[in-house]
């Protein structure tokens, strides 16, 4: 089995808590959430409670990719899981954090 990627937010909808499933050659799956901004890496971003819950439940398989300076020169900041150290649950039911 070769490496395969499914953009699940397009094929299954945006409610899974991640955007992409990466099927690795050894059969393991990685769930990837992508957050994009036109600004720098320290610009706060928002995640749903579902995204945070899935990141905690699937921590060994979950990865967060932060794409910043998207318009000028896209850069990538990858984290292995969404950590409550940099996320704060807001009253509105969204989560904000810095890249």
Image (tube, rainbow, N blue to C red):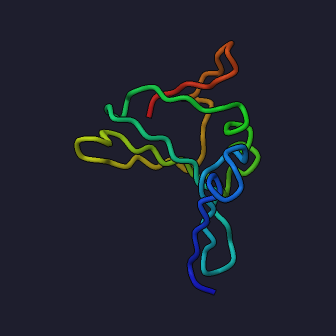
Displayed quadrant of residue 41: top left
Question: In the image, what residue occupies the spot 60% across and 40% down?
Answer: 82
Quadrant (top left, top right, bottom left, bottom right) of the C terminus: top left
Depth check: 73 or 76 in front?
Answer: 73
Q: Horizontal and vertical percent for residue 47?
A: 60, 32
Q: Left or right? Give the position of 40 relative to 77.
A: left
Furthest residue in direction top, as rendered? 91
User: As displayed, is residue 89 above or below residue 33?
Assistant: above
Q: Count numbered badges in the picture.
A: 0
Q: Horizontal and vertical percent for residue 66?
A: 45, 43
User: As displayed, is residue 29 above or below residue 4?
Assistant: above
Question: In the image, what residue occupies the spot 23% across and 42% down?
Answer: 72
Q: Horizontal and vertical percent for residue 13?
A: 69, 50
Furthest residue in direction bottom, as rendered? 1
Q: Left or right? Give the position of 43 relative to 65.
A: left
Q: Horizontal and vertical percent for residue 5?
A: 58, 69
Quadrant (top left, top right, bottom left, bottom right) of the N terminus: bottom right
Question: In the image, what residue occupies the spot 60% across and 51% down?
Answer: 19
Question: In the image, what residue occupies the spot 32% across and 42% down?
Answer: 70
User: As displayed, is residue 9 above or below residue 38?
Assistant: below
């Amino acid at each position: 089995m070769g490496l395969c990627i499914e953009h699940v937010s397009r094929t299954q909808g945006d409610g899974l808590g991640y955007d992409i499933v990466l099927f690795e050659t050894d059969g393991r799956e990685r769930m990837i959430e992508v957050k994009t901004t036109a600004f720098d890496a320290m610009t706060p971003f928002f995640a749903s409670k579902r995204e945070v819950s899935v990141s905690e439940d699937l921590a060994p398989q979950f990865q967060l990719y932060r794409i910043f300076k998207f318009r000028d020169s896209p850069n990538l900041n990858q984290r292995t899981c969404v950590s409550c150290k940099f996320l704060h649950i807001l009253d509105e039911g969204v989560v904000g954090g810095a890249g």
